[in-house]
Image (cartoon, rainbow, N blue to C red):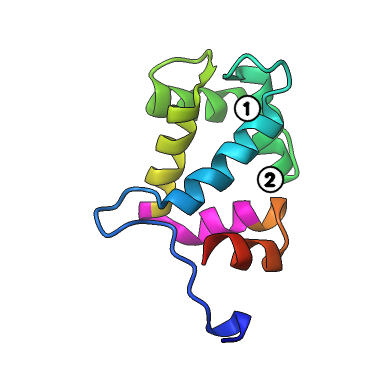
Amino acid sequence: MTSSQKTISLLNEDGTLTEKLCFLLKEIFISFDYDKDNMLSREELRHYFSTLNGERIEDSSLDMAMMITSGNTVGFMLKDFYAFYEFQTKFNTIETISDLSKLFSQETLIERLT
């Protein structure tokens, strides 16, 4: 089977993240958790979103993402990071694929998510 024939699955049938996507997201989370406190702080999240978008995220947008996902403006625990991506993937799979594509090569994504 060629890479163009492989199917990448991001969500299980029940709408939860696949185990393979969780492993990939955990790797991303750890790589952006610079102080290794098991939380992406406000500034670590800002850096993460800025890396994805190529520009600094506005405070209001960052606050909204944090409040909706974690109920605070302190940061994301791993479970919050998963929740953010579960919600985004349910409603905008293309955005999740775009995010992942900015952090991993197409070959890596196919290998790790199929």
Q: Main secondary structure of the magenta part?
A: helix
Counting residues from the N terminus, which is met first, the one under dot 2 or under dot 1? Answer: 1
Q: Quadrant of residue 80?
A: top left
Asked whether the beta carbons under mark 2 and mark 1 sit within 8 Å of each other, the answer is no
- Residue 99 at what x, y percent from top left? 61, 51
Relative vertical location of residue 25 with respect to residue 110 in this rendering, above or below: above
| Magenta span | 90-100
As shown in the figure, which amino acid type bears the numbered disc 1? Leu
- Residue 18 at what x, y percent from top left? 41, 52
As shown in the figure, which amino acid type bears the numbered disc 2? Asn
Bin the neighbour count of mark 1 within 10 Å (Cα to Cα): few under 14, some 14-19, many 20 and up. many
Q: Indicate whether residue 98 is drawn in magenta.
A: yes
Relative vertical location of residue 6 with respect to residue 67 in this rendering, above or below: below
Q: Give the CA distance from mark 2 to mark 1.
A: 12 Å
Q: Residue at x 68, y 18 (%)?
A: 36
Where disc 2 sits, the SS reads helix
Relative vertical location of residue 72 with respect to residue 27 in this rendering, above or below: above
Q: Where does label 1 land, which residue?
A: 45
Q: Residue at x 46, y 43 (%)?
A: 85
